[in-house]
Amino acid sequence: MPELGTNPLAAGEKNISVDSARAAIRAAIVPIRESELVSLNDALGRILAADVISPINVPANDNSAMDGYAFDGAALRADSALTLRTVGRVVAGQPPVANVKAGECVRIMTGAVMPDGLDTVVPLELCRVDGDRIVIPPGVIHARENLRKAGEDLALGRPALLAGCVLRPADVGLIASLGLVQAEVLRRATVAVFSSGDEVVAPGESLPPNCIYDSNRFALIAAVQRLGMTAVDFGLLRDDRAALQGALEKALDRVDAIVISGGASAGDADYTREVMAQLGSVEFWKIAMRPGRPFAFGALRGRNDRRVWLFALPGNPVAALVTFYVFAREALLALAGAKGEALLSAQARSVAAIRKRPGRTEFQRGIVTRGSDGMLEVRTVGSQGAGVLRAMAEANALIVLGHEQGSVAAGQPVDVWLFEGLT
Ligand code: AMP
Ligand code: MG
C-alpha cells in the first residue's frame, strides 16, 4: 500500500484527470475485514466475506428435465422406431423405479430421479402411446437428452459465489438451494456525512436573506444508504477551522469514511483541505472535470493509526452528487469489500450537438430514452449549471464526455452512465 501523503498529485496546483484520481483512490483504499453471520432474509445487498462453497451436488441426483419416458439411450437406432414397455412411473420426490431391463421404460415427471441404468428421457409429445407400450419414431431424440446430471449446476466442493459478491435475490436463493440458512457477510461500512458553509441552513428553519437550504447532506445520506451502508448524519458545520477540526475528530472513531460537502475550494472560507492535512493527509485535490473540480480525497488518522477515508466534495449540489457517483461511490464499495460493482454504462446517440472542451472530463445531466429505431438516444436536461439540482433530479443518466474528447455533433454516440441500476 502506498504511504499516504506522499502522493505527488496532492502537492501540485495542476488539475489531475478523472482516471488518475480514480486509480489513486483504488490504490489507497483498504477494505473492511470484519464479518458477521446474517440470516438469508437479512442478506439482500450485503457483501460476502468469503466464498460460499457448495456442501452438496446441485442437483443431488441425475433427474429428468421433462415429463416423458426414461429409457436407455443405447437402444436408439437412427433408421428405425424404438418400442418400449412401460414398467413403472416415478414423480418428483419419490424413489426411482429399480431393475428396469432392456426393452423397458419408466414414465417420469420433471425433476424425478432417473432410474439406475437409464440416461435418456423422451418427452411425452414425441412418442406414441399404445397401451403399456410406447413407440419412439427414429430421429426425434438422441441418447442422454433431457437428463440433468447430478452436480451439473454446481458440484460439491465448488464455489457457488465468491467473496466480494453483493448479494442479489438470485444469490440469496442460490445460497438457500445449498441448504444453508445464513451467509457470512462483511460488517456494514459506516459513513459520516457533513455539510458545511455559513450560508447553508437546515431545512425546517426559516431562510435568512442570502442563504440556501442544505440539500447536500440529505442527497448524500441517501446516496450512501443506497449502497447498503450506514450513513450517520453529522449535521451542518460553520466555516470555522476549529469547529471543522473538532467535528472531524469526533467522527473519526465512529466511522470508516467521511463525506463532507462545501469548503473544499480555495476560497477564503474553505478550510477542509487544511484540516485534512492536519488530521492526516490530502492525497489529491482539484480534478480536471466539470462539474466537480474542487474535490479532495485523503485519509485521516483515527485511534491506533486506523485510516478514515475522507471525501471532500464541492458544495454545488450537482457537483457534490456527480463527484459522489464518480469517486466516492466506487471507493466506498471497495472499502465495504465489494468487487466489480462498476456503474452501468452504455452508448447512446446524442440527439443534439454538445459543446465540449478537450482537457477535462465533463459529466452532463441527460435523459436516455429509446429512439424510434429502438436504439438508445440521449438529450441533455435543460440547465447544466453545477447548482441546478432540479436538472439532476430530472435526469436518468450522466453523459460522460472523456478527457480528450471535443464537441459532439448531433447523432454521434456518447457514453452514458445510467442512474437506474446504480447501487
Ligand atoms: P463551496 O464549495 O463551499 O464553495 O460551495 C459552492 C456552492 O455550493 C455555494 O453556492 C454554496 O452555497 C453551495 N452549497 C454549499 N453547501 C451546500 C449544501 N449543503 N446544500 C446546498 N448548497 C450548498
Ligand atoms: Mg462554502
Image (cartoon, rainbow, N blue to C red):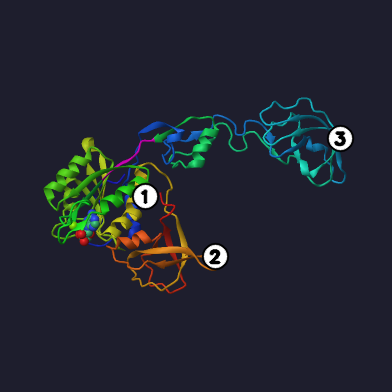
Q: What amino acid is at disc 1? A: Glu
| Residue density around tag 2, few if under 14, some if 14–19, many if 20 or more, within 10 Å | few
Q: Residue at x 15, y 51 (%)?
A: 238
- Say which of 160 and 126 sits in front: 126
Q: What amino acid is at disc 3? A: Gly
Residue 248 numbered tag: none
Q: What amino acid is at disc 2? A: Gly
Residue denoted by label 2: 374
| Foreground tag (2 vs 1) | 2
In terms of sequence position, does the residue under pointer 2 or pointer 1 come before the other? 1
Cα distance in 3D space between marks 1 and 3: 65 Å
Q: Position of residue 85 (x, y in %)?
A: 85, 33
Q: Secondary structure at mark 2?
A: loop
Residue denoted by label 3: 131
In terms of sequence position, does the residue under pointer 3 or pointer 2 come before the other? 3
| Foreground tag (1 vs 3) | 3
Cα distance in 3D space between marks 2 and 1: 31 Å
Residue denoted by label 1: 330
Q: Position of residue 408 (x, y in %)?
A: 41, 72
- Say which of 139 and 28 sits in front: 139
Q: Secondary structure at mark 3?
A: loop
Residue 412: say if magenta. Answer: no
Where is the N terminus found, in terms of image quarters? Answer: top left
Within the image, what quadrant is residue 71 found in? top right
